Image (cartoon, rainbow, N blue to C red):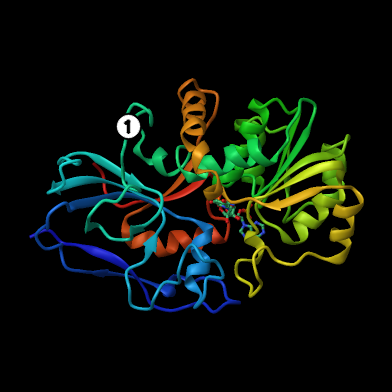
Amino acid sequence: MTENHNTVFVSRPGVNGEPKEENFRFEKCPYPADLQKEEVLIKTLYLSVDPALRCRMNESTGVDYMGPWQIGETIEGFGGVGSVIKSLNPEFAEGDLVCSQYGWPWKEYFVRKPDKSFQKVDRSLVGGKISYCLSVLSLTGLTSYLGITEEGHLQPLHTLVISGAAGACGSLAGQFGHLKGCERVIGICGSDEKCKYLTDELGFNGAINYKTQNIKDELCKHCPKGVDVYFDNVGGAISDQVIKQMNKDSHVILCGQISVYNKDVPYPPPIPEETKQCLQQNNITRERFLVLNYPEKFDESLKQIAEWLLSGKIKVKETIAEGLVNAGPAFVSMMRGGNIGKQLIRVASL
Ligand code: NDP
């Protein structure tokens, strides 16, 4: 008899608390019973680990498109990829690889009646790397691409600054910025190792370690013509500093605000009066960006990203935790900056 395990949500960190490993528990659960009509049995291969899951740990998420996790229930993440073990659904056969970006239980085996968010994986598109369906060729890649193309107003000679630059979205956004023609790309991130990765491997023109360097001085040095576009993944004090260096009529891509996800503030969080004035005086746009608002652009954008990927124009890094037993720790680690590129969990091999 095959064993089955899941990750259960056991306690809330509190709206003002950091998530901890003890908020999650890895435990045995029943192997799924026989299938009903149109259902498939799925073996999970990889799971996506996303900052937005932090708000599901609170009693209220503060947004209407996702609900809070309930104590004692299996964690429901966003993205997952798996293989079909058995099928009573005419559209899926045993051995098919399937992926969803919109809801996947942190379970080794589970049964689903696939809705249209479940898609068969085109192996030629992912270049043989199944995990890419949850990183570069997923909502993550789309967030970076559509943030840049829809909100960036990038032009040649522009200087683009990215916070959270060595993470999943940031590391791709910088490369897309260069491919879209901007002259300088500067990343802000939390370690020297990450800075080195950005400049030596991804071709960023400069990188700033916000934990050890003076952001203002470094921005002045790296952005002699000011900042034209700011891809903001973190918010807070880092973003206040960047906004002060922005040019007239420039643009903030308000992608995420991870520096306040452990705080009890609305989204997007309030910004200091001085920053507000700076935005107004310099006519800087700063509208909330949500990738889910661009579904009609997903197909053509993924096609472009896949073309760049397969022709070697972009590099992808993933930080992979081994085994569902490490799912909770992987989430906690990502929230503390333990990842370079996309944080994933490898639950099983094909
Ligand atoms: P990342 O891979 O970037 O991982 C999170 C990173 O955030 C960590 O590695 C850490 O890197 C950094 N971080 C954590 N705490 C802080 C802090 N207090 N100050 C500064 N940096 C911090 O995650 P993603 O790429 O998946 O997500 C990046 C952002 O994009 C998030 O804000 C997320 O919510 C947002 N997002 C928005 C979407 C949209 O539609 N708008 C869709 C998907 C994601 P470091 O070592 O540099 O501190």
Q: Is residue 240 above or below residue 127?
A: below
Image point 60% across, 66% down: which residue?
A: 261
Image point 19% across, 62% down: which residue?
A: 4
Q: Position of residue 126 (x, y in %)?
A: 38, 31
Q: Position of residue 305 (x, y in %)?
A: 51, 30
Q: Quadrant of the C terminus?
A: top left
**In this picture, residue 27 sits left or right of residue 53:** left
Residue type, numbered disc 1: Asp
**In this picture, residue 327 sits left or right of residue 213:** left
Res 229 quadrant in image: top right
Q: Nearer the viewer, residue 319 or 137?
A: 137
**In this picture, residue 296 sits left or right of residue 103:** right
Tell me: is circle 1 under 8 Å from ligand 1.
no
Q: Is residue 214 visible?
A: no
Q: Which residue is mark 1?
A: 122
Q: Is residue 323 above or below residue 140?
A: below
Q: Nearer the viewer, residue 343 or 232?
A: 232
Q: Nearer the viewer, residue 20 or 246?
A: 246
Which corner quadrant of the figure contains ligand 1? bottom right
Q: Is residue 109 above or below residue 133?
A: below
Identify the residue at the far top of this view.
Answer: 311
- How many marks do you count on the picture? 1
Q: Is residue 187 above or below residue 339?
A: above
Q: Is residue 42 visible?
A: yes
Image point 31% across, 30% down: which residue?
A: 123
Q: Position of residue 291 (x, y in %)?
A: 55, 47
**In this picture, residue 297 sits left or right of residue 98:** right
